[in-house]
Image (spheres, rainbow, N blue to C red):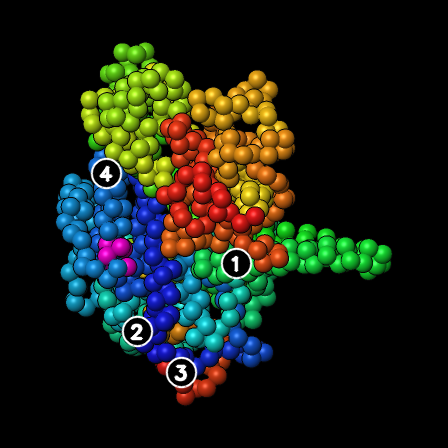
Amino acid sequence: MEQFAPVRRSKDGQPVRYLVVDDSVFARKNLAQMIETFGGQLAGEAGDGMTALTEYERTNPDIVLMDITMPQMEGIEAAEKIVRQHPEARIVMVSSVGYQENIVAALQRGARHFVQKPVKPEVLYEVIKYVLGEDGTVAQAAGAGA
Amino acid sequence: MSPSSDERGAELRQIFFESAQELLQSLNEEALKLEKHPGDGEAVRNIRRVVHTLKGDAAACGFRELSELAHELEDALALEAASSHSALAEMAFVAADTFGNMLSAYRNKKSLPPTESLRRMVKELAGSAGSGKRRRKASGEATAAVVWTEYEQLAVQNAFSQGKQVYQIGARIDPQCLMPIAARQLLLNALSGVGEVLGVRPDAASRAERKRLDLLLASDAPVEQVTARCRIPTVISQVKVAPVKGGAKPAKKAASRPEPRKEIEAPVRLAEKGAVPTPSTAENDGSETAQASAAVADNILRVDAERIDNVLNLVGELIIGKSMLQQALNEFARRHPKEALRGRFTDAMAFQARVLNDLQRSVMKIRMVPVEQLFRRFPRMVRDVARQCGKEVELVISGQDTDLDKSILDAIAEPLTHLVRNAVSHGIEDAYERKRQGKAARGSLHLNAYHQGNQVIVEVSDDGRGIDAQKVKAKAIEQGLLTREEAVRMSETEALEFIFRPGFSTADEITEISGRGVGMDIVQSVLQRLKGRVEIDTHSGRGTTFRLKLPLTLAIIKALLFRVEHRLYAISLNTVAEIARAKESDLHQVDNYEVLQIRNQVLPLVRLGRAPGAEAPAAGKIFVLVMAMGERRLGLIVDALVGEEELVIKALDDQSVATDLVSGASILGDGRVVLILNITAINERYGKSRPSEAGSVASGLLLSQGERTSMPQRSTEVPQ
């Protein structure tokens, strides 16, 4: 499970760009490392919902990994605001089982998918591929752990 | 995380341990808030959030026990009744402690500490709130065939009448996915793109968590497309899509009512690929303000302190290099006074010096951390100690933004802890006593920090009973540290110094100061090591202030270089209050002390070289460095001043220097080694010592013999 076949953007073959939003530095680091193993690129990080909005505008990422519980602005609200401005935004909620209602709310507001914490790389990888759909291409089909 | 990647795991764990400390700190802070304002929903939410994050992080690191315990706690906190529970704050405190113990056990790879008390509290909380809603109570896995309501069947008929296909979808939720309700929502989202969901089981209101979903979908799409839509990795593991024959399974009750659910689907938008992004013009409010916090949050680097120390060391070497260059330049200027190149050298030197200065300051800034990092731990401690003693103490913290070198901050943690603890347990009276004295029942403890010149001052002030200097004196006499005669002459400030003596005042006869001695010697010794000072400011009945005066950094000092007996010494410029010139004939002898009168003040003197009166060149002019050590002043007689220089302190190990009179050494630009004198120790030893011994430190002895030889004759050894 060490390495995953890199997922690239279909349109230009560039690495998929991620925005990671979580108030835990640790969680961000953890996700960033996974992203790296997926051949992705960390476009930005945010520690709260407010920052997530500005970071989204700044970095225009392909995928947002969004925590639910954060100071200032919670993940749901941030997701909702981003989707309202950018319906194409691909937001994946990242949270644990205890916040299921919040995830449901986020999904109702336009989040594309969710992964539960603790995040397993193979799960996240599948989710990423699914969320990207045709916009993502797995570099060597043989290596894909699907 | 993949188990094979050990290194990555180790790094993550390291980050986890660091961030977990911060989480525990906030847990403590929120618990304090909650204790002050019971029922504070915000605090409860924050506690839950912290516990939640800790749980997630711990799980990701594979610390299962911690994660599970946090999970239980989080669950209990989620109960509605929990937020009003009175024992919640207490539980949060216990949780912080328990988690802290577990963390250090993980870190040191020790066996885990007991967690029963926390578990018991959690259980009690959950139990008392038992009537509230409970999650995770699956109401039986309904295995019965799905029964669609009449209304749903109606909708099916309606769809048929519009010429649509209706599919019955059975989906199994991936066993790894623990959030069936979220899974259900995701499936609904996915299907809303291909058609219209007419019915779902379990329905939205149901809190039952089942592993199976059943749906009715009206769609124009072929069965393959619907099936594909339902294949959502990590969420849906199996899917079966069967077209509903025109009224086969659902009972047919043809009625053509308008479809009521049509509108509901609209907001659930599942954007199609290639959707045109709406320009983001509106709703930019708030994003401006977020910019600042974004900058703060995202630009923080965690760097190993050792790396910064390395850089600082290199800067130190550069500074030595600079003075080498300066000296070479001086020499050059002396030899070729007419050389035009001199000016250019000088300019370049000045430029380099300025950049070097900036560089040094920048590196030092990296090492600086706000005192808050240290102050944060005290609210909890003050609360605990106050509770133990049955007192009410309010802690006021100010100046927490003051920056201090990390190593100094770490070093003063312990002394500060002693001071705070003592202030609460001994300085501040209990409520009864305070009322009797006409004070507010609640004592107040003030932690403050601020910059003063090249120093950082950290203050611990209480409004308690103060320290009675007379009683300290009496105690000192009793312990044989002081004669009655000396006691009379001794100032209160001097007398208070006794409380820093190891073992002093541990006896409990003098209740006012008993216990003040506990750890006080640590305060003193740490401060000495840091080349700082501690001052006491106390007023009987009104309180005590301990003032820790600390250097900004340990690594580089501004020093005054001087010569005694042709030897070069340095002292920290901080301690020099003024420099006086005097003739030998101006010096007087009082009580075997040599003194000098400066502006109506009598200044006791210490000679680093000759013994007093020993064949001094009588007419010679001398310099007297006036040292300010708190209240105390002391004159240092030196032969010549050399200059002021920034010295990079190189620590000396105990083998090379057997005296505490020297605190370190440094290398000058020309390669000479200079010893940095420890003024505090010199003052201790010679400023206050018995008159018969006073004023006779041979300069050579600092290097060779240690303190054993304080005989004046030693000075003859000094090479002339």
Residue B278 percent coordinates (x, y): 60, 60
The residue pinned by badge 1 equals: B313
**Relative image position of residue A100 (x, y in whole percent):** 32, 57
What is the x, y in percent for residue B473?
31, 20
Q: Residue B597 location in percent, x, y?
A: 56, 21
Question: What whole-number distance in Å separates the C-alpha atoms at marks 1 and 3?
Answer: 49 Å
Whether B105 is among the magenta residues is yes
Q: Which residue corresponds to mark 3? A: A144
Q: Which residue is mark 4?
A: B90
Judge depth for marks 2 and 1 and give the one in front. Answer: 1
Q: Is residue B576 visible?
A: no
Which disc number belongs to residue B3?
A: 2
Q: Is residue B607 left or right of residue B396?
A: right
Q: State whether residue B586 is above or below residue B273.
A: above
Q: Chain of mark 3?
A: A
Q: Nearer the viewer, mark 4 or mark 3?
A: 4
Q: Which mark is residue B323?
A: none
| Separation of residues labelled 4 and 3 (CA atoms) | 50 Å
Amino acid type, residue under disc 2 in the picture: Pro
**Which badge, 4 or 2, comes first in the chain's sequence?**
2
- The residue mark sitting in front, 1 or 3, is 1
Which numbered mark, 4 or 1, is in the foreground of this view?
1
Query: SS at mark 4?
Result: helix
Q: Nearer the viewer, residue A119 or B510?
A: B510
Disc 4 to disc 2, how far (Cα)? 37 Å
Q: Amino acid at mark 1?
A: Asn
Q: CA distance from mark 2 to mark 3?
A: 19 Å
Q: At numbered mark 2, what does the secondary structure look like: helix, strand or loop?
A: loop
Q: Which residues are magenta?
A: B102-107
CB under 8 Å between callouts 4 and 1?
no
- Tell me if label 2 and label 1 are in contact, CB under 8 Å: no
